[in-house]
Amino acid sequence: MTKAMTNERRLQLEQYLQQIVSDPVVTSSEIFMEYFKKLQMDTFNMPTVQLILRIYMPDGAAVELDVQTSDSAERVLEAALFKLGVSRELGEYFSLFITHKEAKGPFTVVKRIAGFELPFLTIWNLEDDQFQIEVRKWYMNPSNDAMLMGSTEAIDLLYLQAVQEFQMEWTRPTKDQQQKLQHCLKQQNKLKFLELMKTVEYYGYLHITSCTSDYPECDSEVTIWVGNNEMSCHFYSPGGHAENLRLSIKDLICWNVTLLQPKKQEVMSPNHQHLELKFDYQQGSSLKCITIHTEQAFLLSSCLKKMLSERPVHRCKEELEIQVDKATCKSNIRPEQNGVHAKKQALLKDKREYCVVDNISDLDL
């Protein structure tokens, strides 16, 4: 088999695995869940052990959960929401995410943890103590906020995330909006703050930064906002040219994520992957293609798929169609805070011993 044939086979296998773990029929199967749990546990030779896992909220506060190494993200999310007082019926509006916060740097949402993933193994394979697992809302249409207004605890989570988006400057309020929002923060008027945020540009969107693109020319920088049935891309070419492109989700024809192999002189880091998202879109009568290089490629793909699933007319059909994203590649980002690594050996020696596990990070299965 030639090198070109090998690469083509690898790409086809990657796309097949991405499609399998994105199929709701497959991922709702108990057989699949048990198989994938066993696969993850066996891959890392991990015994089933009790431990205490910290799950964070957007303001940095955390809840500690008594879980097992073999507990899935779906199970951990249920436990976290229960401890936060959010009713089980509202669980579909939230998910677990890997986030990263540098001491004096930006905050980044790295990826969504799929329901079948094992959050503890995500931590176990991280090398950086600045990653953590965070509970965040999981819908791309801001109007869905209305579904949570009957729960004080859910409102608290919405408020914390909205404040974070505002303070991180992921949204674009006008000067007047900014003054009103600052006033609401001082008054701690949560409902008024959320009501005002609904009128702010890019509220409820996911912010993707540190990307490069082949459009409008190679090595162009691009900042992306995705949400509310659109993807907004702001391109900045090396020559100083700036261009904005706002695409409706219905204009996207297809997309796929590829895990690129590192160059020979590079060492593959579990914290950083070479990922690209390539998408085709319709512009007038022509079909165009853009490639985005970003470590958040799987997250971006997840958001695009989520927007498709939220479109009421096509929901049933699209849930059964191929939706390319969610990794089966195993991107391991490994961290822990407060000396978690030093506790790992002791944890495995005694199955009854508890371990406090902080910060969590990326695992693209």
Image: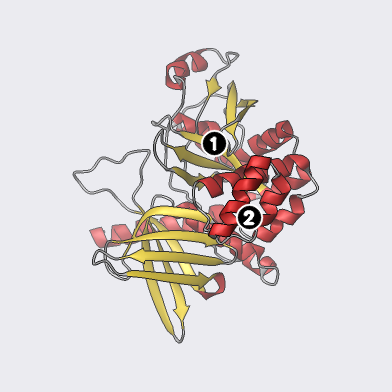
Q: Residue at x 57, y 38 (%)?
A: 134
Q: Is residue 32 visible?
A: no
CA neighbours of label 2 inside 10 A, class few (<14), some (14 to 19), many (20+): many
Which labelled disc corresponds to residue 197? 2
Element assignment for label 1: strand
Q: Position of residue 197 (x, y in %)?
A: 63, 55
Which mark is first along the chain, 1 or 2? 1
**Foreground pick, 356 / 149:** 149
Residue depicted at 62% across the width and 52% down the height: 180
Q: In front here: 37 or 119?
A: 119
Q: How is the image coloured?
A: secondary structure
* Of labels 2 and 1, the one closer to you: 2
Q: Residue at x 70, y 72 (%)?
A: 313
The disc at residue 133 is 1
The image's mark for residue 160 is none
Q: Position of residue 24 (x, y in %)?
A: 63, 55
**Quarter of image, res 223:** bottom left
The residue shown at (45%, 60%) is 224
* Mark 1 Cα shell of 10 Å, populated few (<14), some (14-19), many (≥20): many
Q: How many marks?
A: 2
Q: Is residue 355 above or below residue 95?
A: above
Helix, strand or loop at disc 2? helix
Between the C-alphas of marks 2 and 1, the distance is: 25 Å
Above or below for 153 versus 175: above
Residue type, label 2: Met
Image quarter (top left, top right, bottom left or bottom right) of the N terminus:
bottom left
Above or below 319: residue 160: above
Residue 251 at x, y = what percent? 52, 75
